[in-house]
Amino acid sequence: GAGWTMLDPLCSAELLCNTKDGEFWVDKMEFQQKFDDMTVGYPISEDHHLQSIYTGSLLTHTQQIGGSWIKGFSAGGCRNNSSYNSNPKYWLKVQEGGEVLISLLQHGPWSSLHNFQTGQSVDNPRQQHPYYQAIALHIWKVDKKRFNLTRTLNSTPCASSLTHTYEREVVVHAHLSAGFYLLVPSTFLQGAQGHFLLRVHATCSTFLSAVKVSVQQECGGGEWEMESLSGCWTVGSTAGGSRNFPSHGKNPHVPLIVTYDPGGTNVRVTLCQHSPENTLHAIGFHIYKVSGDVECMVISGTVCPVVSCVPHAHSHEVSVQCRLPPAGYVILPSTYQPDCGAEYTLTIARKIPRKAISCQERLGQTVQEAVVPGAGEHPLQYNYTFWYSRRTPGRPASTQSYEQNIKQIGSFASVEQFWRFYSHMIRPGDLTGHSDFHLFKEGIKPMWEDDANKSGGKWIIRLRKGLASRCWENLILAMLGEQFMVGEEICGAVVSVRFQEDIISIWNKTASDQATTARIRDTLRRVLNLPPNTIMEYKTHTDSIKAWEDFHGLVNASGG
């Protein structure tokens, strides 16, 4: 170009001497005028090896393998989705430490290529990149002898392409030490299909192979309990937007109580928005640990979530699976921008202890389920069931609403089964708000109106804060160990967590049997090591129902 005339002849001659076949010099201004995009590639040596643009080292060891994302099978989407672990997975064995370049190259869809060749246009205006999916590659270093897939994928990767991007190829450059690595290529959207090529170039010896046998996760026992809640983001009220906006705390607050942690994933949350395809909002959610009552908790920018499903995605559904310790939590579903109105469904699945079930079926009769001790276990004299309930203070409860609010956690028949439940349950002292734990003999509901309870009553002890966990444990161990010595008279026990105090009580069948109630009182004082001046109140369930009706003006009342 004309710029060469401005150079010293010796300088221009030297520059021209340094060019190789296919290379040329161009003036900067001319380059900016003629070119809109520039791709910088790795140089190739005469031996056809890539040369690192970072260190200049030759990447002499090469491996490659092909794969596919198949909807419903291996198209798990990004890490926002609980299905992320279904994506294709690959082992990379690095023999010695060295520089490694890993590229994920996706094939262009044949349908889009055909449309391009025939001149057909893409009608979906939301599809900004019709020829490629947004892809990414994440890498974790693992110990294959003690490998847990869920725990690994929930941890921070040692290297990645950072974000999903609409490119034909994404590249990860890293210096890896010797060992095994798990490689997971993914698309951003769950269910997005495509074919890809995974290539590894390294200065050291490597071996790349597909994970042919699915790695079993540590389920730790238990079964899944699922509930779905419908809600909406209302403009000007509950459409607070993401954490980037000060109005984030206005989003709907959905309580979540975790009572069981067997190890591994114990919570799955899925958020689904009900909007047409062409008007989808970017959605996500955050899970916060509750420090008080859910309805009174203020979510500000200084409060950090324990789990987040971000970045917000323009998709019908986003989900996350995680491990949360037993405690109270609140979920805030949100759109990215505030004041985006839409309806949604939030589905929450929690792990609960799995019962040991023995089924006996006779022709023409309903299947009877019974909890039985396992082989070699120490049976209890009676089977018991744990229950949990939580009520909003100040809101009266009818019989129907109370019965719907109380949730069965699980049943047990042996000492070993009890400890498997109890060791994973949250302690009463860590409960928040207006919460109750109930432990009753199997077949008896913790309700005044139950046939086993309606003629009975309960001993009540009010505790100052901080004593509930110890007293509750001593009480239920004494009950399971038959220390009260009153035969079948004991029905169950309750611990109630309140704001100013905590309450424990033990229920019996016959309120009119004064000798039995006196023995229960004396045993209760002994097993809890109560001071002689401790106030203990006995209240019949008939009196409890009457007091409830008088206070709330209800015809039908219930409670514990």
Image: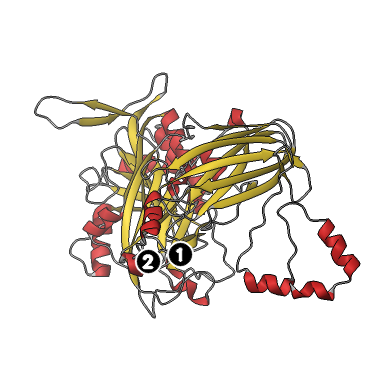
Mark 2 nearby-residue class (10 Å; few <14, some 14–19, many ≥20): few
Depth check, front residue: 49 or 534? 49
Residue at (42, 45) in percent of width and height? 75
Residue 335 sits above or below residue 509 on the image:
below
Query: Seen from this angle, which residue lies furthest top?
Result: 376
What percent of the width, then of the height, locates residue 268?
42, 49
Q: Is residue 346 visible?
A: yes
**Residues at marks 1 and 2, CA–CA distance in whole angstroms:** 10 Å
Left or right of 339, for residue 47: right
What percent of the width, then of the height, locates residue 187?
47, 51
> Tags 1 and 2 in contact by the CB under 8 Å rule?
yes
Residue 23 sits above or below residue 552 on the image:
above
Residue 405 sits above or below residue 152 on the image:
below
Depth check, front residue: 350 or 37? 37
> What is the three-letter code of the residue carrying label 2?
Pro
The numbered dot on residue 393 is 2
Residue at (50, 38) in percent of width and height? 66
What percent of the width, then of the height, locates residue 188?
47, 54
Tag 1's secondary structure?
A: loop
**Residue with the mark numbered 1:** 293
The quadrant of the picture occupied by the N terminus is bottom right
Quadrant in the rendering for residue 201: top right
The numbered dot on residue 39 is none
What percent of the width, then of the height, locates residue 229?
32, 59
Mark 1 nearby-residue class (10 Å; few <14, some 14–19, many ≥20): some
Residue at (60, 28) in percent of width and height? 145
